Image (cartoon, rainbow, N blue to C red):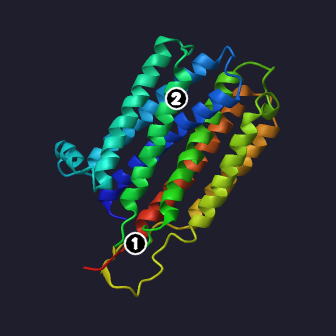
Amino acid sequence: MHNSEWSLVFFTLMSQLSAGVIVCVFIFSNFSRANHDKWPLFLKRTTLIATSFMFIAALFSFFHLASPLASVYALSNLQSSWLSREILMVGVFTATLVITTFYTIKTRGEGKWIRMMLLVSSIAGLLLVFSIGKVYMISTVPPWNTPATLLSFYVTTFLLGASLVMALFYQVFCAKSKKNRNPLTASFPVLKIFTGIILLAVIAQLINTLFVSPADLGANIAFLPANMGNTPAFTTWIFWPLAMGLLIRNLYFSTPAYRLETGLFYLVFVLLFVGEFSSRMLFYDAYFRVGV
């Protein structure tokens, strides 16, 4: 993987994480106890975090450009360029996040338009992920030009978003309270849904790592990186199952120490992020171009 691609790894992961957080918060707000007295604090933290990650993602996107200020001219090619559409959606999604976060803080999480604004931000985030995926689906790059690329990006979105939101959820709703301690699934059944989402996402990503590789090296290769394949595939197979096992343990078996329990939920997110980071490196390592 080339040094210039490191910024793209962080941009794609951070933007998908941001989109995943806001989508999962919207799901929580509709299927869980939105009238709970701690919902305002939960909404404030999650929207702030989603916005912060998106700003970080935007910052990393500039590191890949030789002339960052010239990126605005890419918007003139919206009709035919997915890169132009990606840049547009970065701006749209960031704007919706800022507005939603500002409204949440101003209304202290009790505004009547919060769910609608979360929905708009979620749609913008999902469209951003779609545009990012389409940027990489290039006909001259066989390993990327497949629906698996788009699917993998969406899986990353829900995997990272759900795991971080669950950690924040536990920290806010179970802080120094024995009433809402584990098993969390008894008090908040929506967590069962999120556990299922994460499990399916982990399985999908593990399967995907088997196929993200330059399979047809006998093609008319125009460019093949000299340092391709530096990322060992087994790294993803270590972190994802380990995180899944720890998450199941966290949901169904409690410990006396609240801080330890909270830390274990965040550890699940960290393990999944490391697994996704390794997977994204494999994705870039798989690059080769055919044709002229």
On the image, numbered disc 2 is attached to which residue? Answer: 118
Residue in the picture at 83% in, 31% down: 186
Quick check: can you spot residue 6? yes
Determine which residue is flagged by label 1.
228
Residue 35 on image: x %, y %: 68, 17
In 3D space, how far apart are the residues under numbered discs 2 and 1 (Cα atoms)? 40 Å
In the displayed structure, would residue 110 be above or below residue 240?
Answer: above
Q: Position of residue 156 (x, y in %)?
A: 54, 51
Residue 260 shown left or right of residue 94 in the figure: right
Q: How many marks?
A: 2
Tell me the residue at 51%/69% (across/down): 212
SS for dot 2:
helix
Going by the numbered disc 1, the residue's amino acid type is: Met
Q: What's the amino acid at mark 2?
A: Leu
Is label 1 in a helix, a strand or a loop?
A: loop
Q: Which mark is residue 107?
A: none
User: Within 10 angstroms of label 1, few (less than 14), some, or many (20 or more) residues?
Assistant: some
